[in-house]
Image (tube, coloured by chain):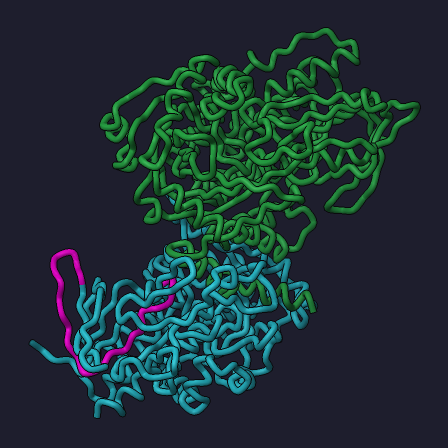
Chain colours: A cyan, B green
Amino acid sequence: MRENDVIVIGGGLSGLVAAAVAAQSGKKVLLLTLGAGTLTIGGGIVDVLGYGDEGVSLATPRAGLLEVGPEHPYKKIGPVAIEESIQFFKGICAAEGYPYLGSLDEMQWIPTAAGTLKPTCLVPKTMDTTQLNTAKNVVVLGFESLKDFYPHLITKNFKNIPGFQDKNYEMVMIDPGLADGRDVTALDVARWLDTPEGLQDCTEKMRHVLTPGSVVIIPPVLGTRPNYAIADSLAQALQCTFVETAAVPPSITGLRLRTMLLSYVKKLGVRIVEQAAVARSIVENGKCTAVVTAGIDRERTYYAKAFVLANGGFYGGGLVAEPGQVIEPIFNLPVVAPEDHGLWANPDLFSNKPQPFAQIGIAVDEKMRPLDGDGQVVLTNVFIAGRNLQGYDFCFEKSGNGVALASGYQAAMSMDREIK
Amino acid sequence: MQKATVVIIGGGATGVGILRDLCMRGVDAILLEQQDLAYGTSSRYHGLLHSGGRYAVKDAEAGRECIEENTILRKIGKHCVEETEGFFARTHLDDEAFEPIWLAACAKVGIPAIPITVAEARRLEPNLSSKIQSVYRVPDAAIDGFRMVWQNVASARKYGGRVMTYTTVIGIEHSNNQVVGMKIRNTLTGEISNLACDFIVSAAGSWAGEIAALAGITVNVQPDRGTLIAFNHRITSRIINRLRPASDGDIFVPHGSITILGTTSASVKNPEDNIPNAKEVVALLDIGEALFEDLRSYRMLRAFAGTRPLYSADPNAKGRGASRGFVTLDHAHDGLTGFISVVGGKFTTYRLMGEKVTDLVCQYLNVKTACRTAIEPLVEDASPELMTKARRYFPSYGADLAASRLGAAGLEKVVERMQEQPEKRQLVCECENVTLAEVEEAADDQTSFMISDVRRKTRMGMGTCQGAFCTFRSVGAVDANGLSWGQDTKTLFQEFLQGRYKGIRPILWGNVMREMELSRGIYEGTLNINGAINNARK
């Protein structure tokens, strides 16, 4: 039996970051994943904090960090560790040849496929809006048969956004020739651009419709690999600036980030077991000694000194909701949820208040260890990261990947101190 | 000023049934609906085409009407009816003594109730509880309320019928005790106008009391709220009724790939009291487990509620105690000629109600043409040639679904769109197999003003994902085609997603919660629709 130092449960952003931190400090790390995490759903940009209470937009992500409520993960983690986590992340991106832009002191407002702007913090170079913000002429480029991108949504709505009203907008379409009777997603277009033939074909087709010097808003299709080769090649050949939008799943920017992080942790020696459905844990004297996976063949037991629980919230399966109560199925940790189901959801889907059900999760201390109702640590060697934490509505405040990153970092750092 | 001989108030099954009947008899008629067609009770029920078995014991006349209309609607509305048959199943919790009483009542009104063994019933419907005691087969069927209403309108339009949606009546005008017209308001624009007419028929269902009050007349309609659950499975292939005196949560109706469980019953003051709550849902699940033991393991899609328009001359009769028969009230007896209310009744007998009311109106108008609504199909079948053509453009089995939804005339238009622009065959709604061409056709209709109106015509957004993916596409498509009804796109997003949320909120647990997190992740997290709305609010 091989003893691991650390087992990380969950292969999304928080799990991958925790695995990277632990492995970098020399731990033997095993990563158990069930699915692909939500990076390929939600996207590869790192929102840290865009809106404060009642939906008021913040000047910078840092401005909001000190204002969050007492149960918010950022409050537990603290500004120092948050800043460190961002530097850690940017360091990985730079080392892997896929550098990200941004900092806590600058709010990036990026275009979305719905023709809105969205506040975020760290973005890949392909979502840099510096040129877009000052451009006089903007082209929105769509692809024939790509059904999840409608250029008119952007040109129409941008005309009403302060700072974007006086620009000239033009819509152009190119035909990637991918239809052959089936529906086309951004992933199909990105894979087309991944091939040298596709890239050349696309470059020529774009050449017919783009004037050199244009700023071009496009769906996130600039290749599936975590590098800027395709973006740079198009930019150089056409002398245009391309800006990818935030868009509906499948998320190509998230796919790139996931590929990059997987490659990074593998290089650090992290072992990964896929399709590992963790069913339960073995606990002795307030410590977890092992987790048990239930696959299609048999149960397997994985031992470690410490564990990071980063298997997501309701969507990921880390939390399971029943009428009036919420269960954390692996450790049966206490989950903070309103008893009256009538209080779980606001009357309106969209309002100027966060959704109570979105804030349901596990209470933790500063080290990200789970707490019971009396504020006592339940398990001393289990650390929580990501959406299963209580106290924040990532959709409302725009903090999803930011909390994942900071809590994954903090969980692994405090674990490192615990098991030394 | 607009004019019509007859104005019908209410765009539910009864109203469109009257419109169709009047128009087929050559009477100039217009129908007004305060929301969208089938917005009210006609779509907020379980979609059961009653055999009459449920009413046989307590209300023999309603039972007899049901079995007769059941037979007729299978013929004229075959694209709206799924001939599933039904079971009446007695569980271990139900009184044995009721069984012979029920059987005798069915025999008396001519409803065939054929006993089968419990073993055979469970072979046919394996999910049925092992504790079932006895089972009878009855000729129940499933019926699509939205489609029935739409196909009635399609038929009425052929005969010159007109429909105005999002129009509410704010005053009834009369001269010498004779109706001469009404004042109406467009609920979307607020515009007020006059509509001249000789006759008003109120088929406003739960709202009939409010309409009558405009003319100073009292009509005792007691709205009775019923909550239902839609499951994302075909739990049963047959309708399952519980064999006991009519009560809560004892009917399961399969529709395509889903099943509806209903209902509750509670008197309410406001006919628009249609927001379900978790308590009702949990209560329905508790009761429903007597018929399907594994009920809680099935995924729910949404909960919804509507109000039954119960009528009683006796204002004290409530809930299931009130009759489900229907009554035609000629307000000439109240001193106002040219005003009729039709109240009570149920979806299964909508056509008959229409026939009776139209007979009465025609008497006044001296129109002698006979009623043909029982013999002429609502829509024509698509020809084999059209179907062959349609299959060239529609993805997979979508052609048959669309032919049923649209009828021959509608299908032809949609196929034309696809022929001209093959990319329009793309699926906007993957759950319900709705193509871009169909969405555009529905969005183009004069009664469409928002994405939900397109949904009711096409079923888009009614499947498993409840709008998580198709909302973006439908907003993008109607906007790209200049069909956005003068509304900004964040309002279109908000209206449609809020409509879906209303039915999800009371069942927010299990996989529904997961879907909710996905949907919010897309529209709020990624696309920041909420941020744009809050920004506009400031």
Q: Compared with residue B123, is residue A244 higher up or lower down, i.e. above or below?
A: below
Q: Does residue B44 lie above or below B524 as drawn?
A: above
Answer with left or right where residue B194 lies relative to residue B279. right
Q: Classify residue B104 by image quadrant.
A: top left
Q: Where is residue B43 in the image (x, y as percent from the top left)?
A: 55, 36
Q: Residue at x 47, y 65 (%)?
A: A357
- Say whether residue B134 is left or right of residue B363: left
> Can residue B116 be seen at all in this image of the molecule?
yes
Where the C terminus of chain B falls, by quadrant?
bottom right
Quick one: which residue is furthest to the right in this view?
B176
Q: Is residue A296 within the magenta segment? A: yes
Question: Which one is nearer the viewer's eye here, A157 or B280?
Answer: B280
Write the residue at 69% across / 33% down.
Answer: B315
Left or right of B436? Residue B269 is right
Could you say where residue A339 lies in the image, as x and y percent from the top left?
Answer: 45, 65
Residue at (25, 86) in percent of width and height: A24
Q: Quadrant of the N terminus of chain B?
A: top right
Image spot of residue B8 (x, y percent): 72, 27
Q: Is residue B211 above or below residue B384?
A: below
Task: Estimate the x, y position of residue B376 in percent, counting from the top left.
Answer: 56, 13
Q: Depth check: A82 or B311 in front? A: B311
> Is there any visible trace of residue A199 in the rendered image?
no
Along the line of sight, the residue nearer the viewer: B296 or A191: B296
**Placement of A287 over or under A275, stated as above or below:** below
Please give the count of numbered marks on the rendered protein. 0
Furthest-front residue in view? B97
Residue at 25% from the left image edge and 83% from the top image edge: A381
Residue A111 in magenta?
A: no
Magenta span = A294-315
Q: Relative to residue A350, is residue A334 drawn left or right?
A: left
Residue A36, picture quadrant: bottom left
